[in-house]
């Protein structure tokens, strides 16, 4: 494998708790939305302004132009959610797992599909070691980077930037990406610490000397640093590949959202601000979502999403015949999966099965 080792707040309602119980598919944005409770009073407007200014925006539409999949009228909403392993800044470098690593990579990538009608959601994880064809892209400085075949998916972010990651996903899937969300190492750690840790049911003993993560099987409450190691561990579980940890990442995200929902954060403005601050300071979105007001409006449109219908799937992959340490999209499963998402249709069970499992 690669040497580089290397993510709630419904609007308050006094009449019903149902919105709080129905939102789970927005992941990182859920913590951000809590700050809206603080923005209702003029005396606290400066808090809103401070946190609003934390969010960084990327103009995806301008960078990609017209060379994109068609947006179908019944295709729902699609979000590309990235966990970035940027070492920029002392805090991120400290969390990098030891050793100097230049640049940044997309450590975790999920395409979150919210179908028309907003009643359910599905998250498709793309293994970072998947070999893909990177299309021709334009960098932030205006220079053009030629397309290239058989590059690792997680290298696209480091070599060209987030807009090219979106373009790569669109080219490989035919799915139009409506929104982009990214959070870095430090932001993920701070978010977990802000809510007092997350309890996960560790599926097996983990002894990862590379990350320093040592856990016994069973329920364990993890702090931010442990949680980061948990979602990034690869040597401590399965065959040591990226595939083994995808299940941990998906499990952890569900546990994180459950923890946020279980706390009385709406009744604690201090905790709400703390969570919002930790999320926004490391959050990057597409330019259309790069404000608290825009994030809140988008979240409100997701009111009907039922957490019971949230489904997590790994993109079906097979071990590459040339380099068994890499994987490629498995066909016809991957094609069937993307087709169902494009058409807002039910995903066939066969399209959820991956020849390479990482076990």
Image (cartoon, rainbow, N blue to C red):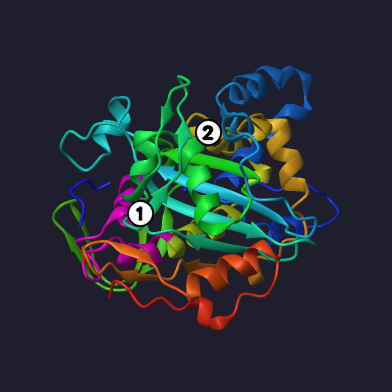
Camera-side residue of 333 and 135: 135
From what the image shows, is residue 348 above or below residue 182? below
Residue at (35, 50) in percent of width and height: 149
Camera-side residue of 160 and 349: 160
Residue at (80, 62) in percent of width and height: 117
Q: Looking at the rendered structure, which numbered label has been put on residue 284?
A: 2
Q: Is residue 259 visible?
A: no
| Percent x, y of residue 86 | 34, 35
Residue at (62, 45) in percent of width and height: 68
Asked whether residue 357 is drawn in magenta, I would say no
Image quadrant of residue 54?
Answer: top right
Q: Name the quadrant of the C terminus.
A: bottom left
Q: Is residue 206 left or right of residue 17?
A: left
Image quadrant of residue 21?
Answer: bottom right
Asked whether residue 227 is drawn in magenta, I would say yes
Tags 1 and 2 touching, CB below 8 Å: no
Q: Which residues are magenta?
A: 222-249
Q: Earlier in the sequence, mark 1 or mark 2?
A: 1
Camera-side residue of 18 and 2: 2
| Percent x, y of residue 19 | 75, 56
Q: Is residue 316 visible?
A: yes
Residue at (74, 18) in percent of width and height: 43
Mark-to-mark CA distance, 1 and 2: 19 Å
The kind of secondary structure the magenta stretch mainly shows is helix
Q: Residues within 10 Å of mark 2 (few under 14, many from 20)?
A: many
Image quadrant of residue 240?
Answer: bottom left
Please give the residue where the numbered disc 1 appears in the rendered image: 128
């Amino acid at each position: 494998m690669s040497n580089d080792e290397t993510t709630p707040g419904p609007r308050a309602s006094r009449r019903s708790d149902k919105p709080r119980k129905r939102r789970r598919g927005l992941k990182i944005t859920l913590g951000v939305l809590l700050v809206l409770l603080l923005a209702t009073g003029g005396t606290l407007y400066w808090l809103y302004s401070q946190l609003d200014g934390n969010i960084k925006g990327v103009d995806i539409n301008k960078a990609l132009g017209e060379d994109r999949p068609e947006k179908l009228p019944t295709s729902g909403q699609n979000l590309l959610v990235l966990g970035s392993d940027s070492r920029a800044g002392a805090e991120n470098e400290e969390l990098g797992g030891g050793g100097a690593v230049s640049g940044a990579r997309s450590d975790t990538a999920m395409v979150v599909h919210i179908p028309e009608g907003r009643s359910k959601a599905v998250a498709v994880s793309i293994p970072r070691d998947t070999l893909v064809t990177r299309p021709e892209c334009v960098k932030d400085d205006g220079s053009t980077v030629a397309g290239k075949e058989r590059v690792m998916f997680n290298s696209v972010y480091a070599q060209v930037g987030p807009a090219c990651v979106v373009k790569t996903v669109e080219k490989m899937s035919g799915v139009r990406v409506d929104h982009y969300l990214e959070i870095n190492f430090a932001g993920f750690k701070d978010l977990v610490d802000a809510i007092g840790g997350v309890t996960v049911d560790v599926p097996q003993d983990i002894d990862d000397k590379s990350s320093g993560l040592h856990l016994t099987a069973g329920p364990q409450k993890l702090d931010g640093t442990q949680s980061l190691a948990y979602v990034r561990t690869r040597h401590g579980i399965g065959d040591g590949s990226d595939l083994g940890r995808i299940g941990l990442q998906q499990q952890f995200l569900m546990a994180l959202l459950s923890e946020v929902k279980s706390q009385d954060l709406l009744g604690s403005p201090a905790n709400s601000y703390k969570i919002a601050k930790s999320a926004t300071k490391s959050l990057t979105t597409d330019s259309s979502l790069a404000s608290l007001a825009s994030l809140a409006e988008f979240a409100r449109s997701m009111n009907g999403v039922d957490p019971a219908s949230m489904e997590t799937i790994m993109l079906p992959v097979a071990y590459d015949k040339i380099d068994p340490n890499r994987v490629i999209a498995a066909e016809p499963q991957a094609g069937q999966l993307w087709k169902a998402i494009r058409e807002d249709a039910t995903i066939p069970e066969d399209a959820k099965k991956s020849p390479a499992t990482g076990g």
